[in-house]
Image (cartoon, grey):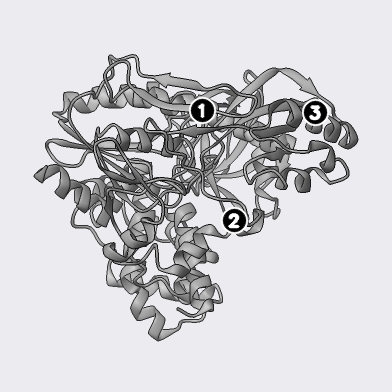
Amino acid sequence: MKKSTRLNLLIALAYCVTLIGGMFLGYRFLKDQGFQVQKDVRYANTEEGKVEDIIHIIKKKYVDDINADSLKNLPIDSLLHQLDPHSVYLPPTEAFELAEDLDGNFEGVGVEYYILNDTLLVTNVLKDGPAFLSGIKPGDKILKVDTNVVSGRFLPRSAMMGKIKGKKGTTVQLTIQRQGTANPLLFSVKRGKVELSSIDAAYMINPETAYVRIGKFGATTDADFAIAIKNLKAKGMKKMVLDLRDNGGGYLTAATALANQFFPENKLVVYTEGKHDPRTEYFTTGGGEFEQGKLAVLINENSASASEIFAGAIQDLKRGVIIGRRSFGKGLVQEQFAFEDGSALNLTIARYYTPLGRSIQKSYKKGYKAYQQDIENRLNSGELTAESQKADSLMNQMPYITKDGRKIFAGGGIQPDIYVRLDTSGYNGFYATLLQKKIFIDFVFETLADRYTADYLNKNMSVFSISDKDYVDFLKYAESKKVKIDTKQLIAAKPLIYKNLKLMLCKYYLGDAGYYRAHNQSDPMIKQALNYLATN
């Protein structure tokens, strides 16, 4: 594979995770932390003071022995990169957003939006949130926030979001342009606490099998899951496909709490241990909602941290089958230390180990940059796209032999029991350009959404495809956005274009659940999981 082709493929895959993967409409972010938070102690607010405090914290808390004094003259980022790839410094805004995301709620009005042609287009209104109760609808365009004109101003996303979000109990005036109304509408919305579920989708994929997708491991994951499972059990669920692909992790305790839903009491899920952090074991308490029933767990190269804790427990204790590709390989636990200005240090304090004692952390001996390029290296080596036999040979470099004689991969992530290669058909430079320039999303929001309805898509999802006219108009739209049509690459990418326009349309009208219902109809991992559950 040529270097330029690999680069285009990586770009396309990266955008597919963020655009096609259902995270492009607002404030849901994949976080690879897996940390606990120390909220009571506040440290310095100056650069010099922070460095001194960080050195002090490293001496007292870091997972390994290290000469912390040798790091004193380095900038904060360089200092932390000398430790490991997951010890990081978070500026105030990032620290706040991360805490908000994992806590499962935020204070604001409860809308998801997309910046279309420099205009804030409301793409989703969270049910029972302040905006929903005020009458704001998907498709509305926000022209002004209080007295601030936000339409056509080329404002960055952070500036726009900062004007809409705010403290609970405060009021914001939104000037809305709604299709079919001649004059703008004025809405007075009282901000409140908006609850966010960490369950992206939960539905019956066939009469006996449920599909559940968890996007992150946050403070409410266990409770969200329990509610979803009770509803699915009422619909006849006996088997489950649990999708943890692209789940970057979150709170360690959220992963152990979820594992409790699948195991009887007194089962070791994970243990952590570090130089200054004694061994801590996490056991199940029993009484979960799905202790019985067949289970298939889906993972890929972006499943990290808490996702790997859960998948490792399922694999070690033989509770279900792991399907997909080798996970990210993040087996370090961070504790968060807050500074006076709202910034924070996430410092690695321990490693976590699966019930059989496997460390999942991949090597970072070659340095921070090489670590960041690991997924690209997997693609270049053929690991992600190889047939199963080649993939198995790549994975058997560090086998772990269990007491019952099973060979399980140890180090560098969780190796699936059933490998499913990454299908790169149609991913090329032309397709990557369409993604980079946001042609799919813009075309759906500007044109395609007006041609269909939520009711029509919901009733016809299994047979629906965009029309040939839609496809031709899409290409015309791409050309109007200065995208040069490469005929040869277009032919190869055509099936993907049809598929992704359908997915975007379902996402727009039916939300995450609709997106995954549409996506799963042709997903090879889903097919493999259903075949396994039907025959084992």
Residue 150, compared with residue 10, is above or below; it is above
Residue 276 quadrant: top right
> Is 430 positioned to the left or the right of 185 in the image?
left
C-alpha separation, residue under disc 2 versus residue under disc 1: 24 Å
> Is 20 positioned to the left or the right of 228 in the image?
right
Assess disc 1: are there few (<14), some (14-19) or many (≥20) residues with their C-alpha within 10 Å of its C-alpha: many
Q: Can you give x and y, in whole percent of width and height, for residue 142 in the image?
A: 59, 43
> Which residue position is annotated with label 1?
272
Identify the amino acid type marked 3: His
Identify the amino acid type marked 2: Gln
Are the residues at dot 3 and dot 1 in contact (C-beta closer than 8 Å)? Answer: no
> Which residue position is annotated with label 3?
56
> Which residue position is annotated with label 2?
372
State whether residue 328 appears in this view. yes
| N-term mark: 2 or 1 | 1
Q: Can you give x and y, in whole percent of width and height, for residue 97 in the image?
A: 63, 35
Residue 23, compared with residue 212, is above or below; it is below
| N-term mark: 3 or 1 | 3
| Residue displayed at 82% across by 29% down | 53
Identify the amino acid type marked 1: Thr
C-alpha separation, residue under disc 3 versus residue under disc 1: 22 Å
The residue lying toward the viewer, choosing from 357 and 385, is 357
| Residue displayed at 49% across by 76% down | 5
Secondary-structure class at tag 2? helix
The residue lying toward the viewer, choosing from 5 and 401, is 401
Q: Can you give x and y, in whole percent of width and height, for residue 279 in the image?
A: 52, 22
| N-term mark: 3 or 2 | 3
Secondary-structure class at tag 1? strand
Quadrant that contains the C terminus:
top left
